[in-house]
Image (spheres, rainbow, N blue to C red):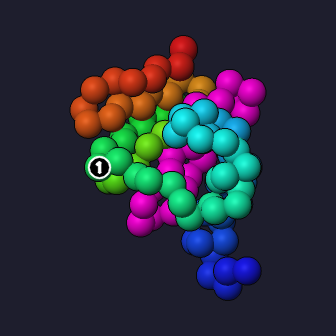
């Protein structure tokens, strides 16, 4: 069990998003649940623009969208994992728009 909040929350996010993340990574959700730190991160920069015009940007990261959860999860190599509302959000990877929710 992790004592510090960032690793503990990162592990919880991987577990909560295991199905979606596994589909994105091409592995099984069981593999992710067994090894929550085993994600191979690309050298991509993910930028999320939210409905209120807030912007976040992460290096060495990837994102997953879940319509069922109405959310976008960003998984980063060094800065934890983060979940954002997807309402009217836009996600760019390396400067190219990859997702836009209307």
Residue 92, picture quadrant: top left
Crowding near the residue tagged with mark 1, few <14, some 14–19, many ≥20 C-alpha atoms within 10 Å: few
Image quarter hosting the N terminus: bottom right
Splitting the image into 4 quarters, where does residue 34 fall?
bottom right
**Placement of 61 over or under 65, stated as above or below:** below
The reply to whether the magenta stretch includes residue 66 is yes
Point out the stretch of residues depicted in magenta. 65-84
Q: Is residue 34 left or right of residue 72?
A: right
> In the visual, does 58 lie left or right of 99?
left
**Left or right of 4: which side holds 24?**
left
Image x and y of residue 35, in percent: 64, 62
Percent of width and height locating residue 15 = 72, 54
Please state which of residues 36 and 90 is positioned toward the viewer in this rendering. Answer: 36
Judged left or right of residue 66, residue 57 is left
Q: Quarter holding the C terminus?
A: top right
User: At x 60% / y 47%, what residue is drawn?
Assistant: 83
Q: Nearer the viewer, residue 51 or 7?
A: 7
Q: Main secondary structure of the magenta part?
A: strand
In the rendered view, tell whether residue 92 sits above or below residue 38.
Answer: above
Foreground residue among 31 and 99: 31
């Amino acid at each position: 069990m992790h004592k510090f909040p960032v690793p503990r929350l990162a592990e919880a996010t991987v577990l909560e998003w295991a199905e979606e993340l596994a589909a994105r990574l091409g592995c099984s959700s069981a593999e992710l649940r067994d090894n929550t730190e085993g994600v191979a991160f690309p050298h991509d920069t993910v930028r999320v623009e939210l409905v209120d015009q807030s912007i976040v940007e992460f290096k060495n990261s990837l994102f997953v969208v879940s319509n069922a959860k109405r959310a976008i999860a960003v998984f980063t190599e060094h800065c934890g994992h983060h979940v954002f509302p997807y309402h009217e959000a836009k996600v760019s990877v390396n400067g190219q728009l990859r997702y836009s929710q209307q």
